Image (cartoon, coloured by chain):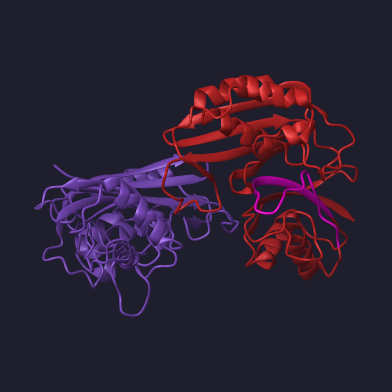
Chain colours: A purple, B red
Amino acid sequence: MTRFALTVEFDGRPFMGWQRQAHGPSVQQAIEDAAFAVTGERVAVHAAGRTDAGVHALAMRAHLDIAKPITPFRLMEALNARVRPNPVAILACEPVADDWHARFSCIGRRYVYRIVARRAQLALDAGRAWRIAPPLDAEAMHEAAQMLVGLHDFTTFRSVHCQSESAVKTLDRLDVVCTGDRLDVHAAARSFLHHQVRSMVGCLALVGQGRWRAQDLRDALEARDRAALGLNAPPDGLYFAEALYP
Amino acid sequence: MTRFALTVEFDGRPFMGWQRQAHGPSVQQAIEDAAFAVTGERVAVHAAGRTDAGVHALAMRAHLDIAKPITPFRLMEALNARVRPNPVAILACEPVADDWHARFSCIGRRYVYRIVARRAQLALDAGRAWRIAPPLDAEAMHEAAQMLVGLHDFTTFRSVHCQSESAVKTLDRLDVVCTGDRLDVHAAARSFLHHQVRSMVGCLALVGQGRWRAQDLRDALEARDRAALGLNAPPDGLYFAEALYP
């Protein structure tokens, strides 16, 4: 039995999310089915993060255990051949120690949230970014974001379905980077609560539109109450970008 | 009657190309139908370039004449509302002189061709870039590209369906810019022949893969014979990026 770590890119649009669901397609199922087609083995694929419906990944990390003797390169090529036509691509595959776990060994996660500030609908990036009508004050958003960085109780920014034991988390980075009409929000932490990035981005957008002052964001954080959330951003703009391991 | 200049973004995947066709959807028809829905007028929309099936635009320029009194802003908003669900977006709309012509007044055109050098299929950019298995020598491609810049007979790089009177054109720029596993080929000229960018990029890819030497590209150019073409790149990676006017 060999444990393989995968790096996976996927377009979240056709999926119910990463996790296997009874009622619709998932990225996990697409990869597990491909692995079965390659090896004849019914394996479980574990990921660093369980993304929601419509959320994308530039480089999700995952692992699976394979009994059949196969090189990492052959496994990657075969999984890519079998995972089609799903919009999923295995970018890298490497053998890891038996106790390496894509989720539990992960010590850092990074997401990017893409916003396009313009009036017209997105033709090329439909489903791939969040369009917001300008004006959008990126500097005000970046400045307000800094008050969320650090150790906080993020109850306001957490889905009611969140299964995490504690809402107290340390946010390492929340940067708003503006290039022309595009704003990328970079979020990094050891781990995130369910909907945390989308909830933070939604409230930052309110600040960017001038509908919220920075103090409103602070009040929302300090309320520790989901009802104080201003706005949950749509999944379209969210990308799982990186998972870090020791 | 007012002439309006439009700046249009579109995803080329569902279209037979820019130009209206009897046998399938076109970007031109999508905009003309939207204009009819807005104004009740059957108008012709003229573009700076007639892109092929599957070719995209970041900023195509086009024009149309409207009799109904309407501001540019209202026209843009109404066209965007009516052109849905086609993946077409009007990014700008401005009144222009009656003799301004999107195609005939245009004095410069710029295309970008996007390549991703990797083994795995494209999940996020399927239909939006050309994937080529590495290694791909971007420097060799850029260097070879420079021999195509300038005044040449581009018969080799021209579709047999090309309707241009002459194959002699001046290519102003052909740059290969590499960032990680992404290569963007920037092409600029007063005008291009049918399939010229895709044909040039296809041959540059052969150089990048080491299947062609720079001399093979020179021989192909000097042959002035379509049969000497090495490879025509797929439409997926091609974007009409800019049209210049006096």
Residue at x-position 61% and y-position 21%: B214
x, y (%) of residue B31?
74, 60
Q: Residue A57: in sight, yes or no?
A: no
Q: Nearer the viewer, residue B177 or B203?
A: B203
**In the shown orientation, is residue B20 left or right of residue A227?**
right
Q: Is A108 a magenta residue?
A: no
> Considering depth in this image, is B18 or A121 the residue closer to the camera?
B18
* Coordinates of residue B210 in the picture (x, y in percent): 52, 27
View extreme (front): residue: A69
Q: Quadrant of residue A169?
A: bottom left
Magenta segment includes B46:
yes
- Say which of B29 and A231 sits in front: B29
Q: Which quadrant is the N terminus of chain B positioned in?
A: bottom right
> What x and y, as percent, mark residue B26?
74, 60
In front here: A63 or A131?
A: A63
* B138 to A136, vertically: above or below: above
Residue at the spot 27% in from the left edge and 51% down from the top edge:
A6
Where A95 sits versus B153, above or below? below
- Going 34% across and 59% down the picture, which residue do you hit? A198
Question: Which residue occupies the extreme left position in the image?
Answer: A99
Q: Quadrant of the C terminus of chain B?
A: top right
x and y percent of residue B206 in the render?
Answer: 57, 32
Q: Would residue A173 be visible to someone looking at this image?
A: yes
Q: Which residues are magenta?
A: B43-64
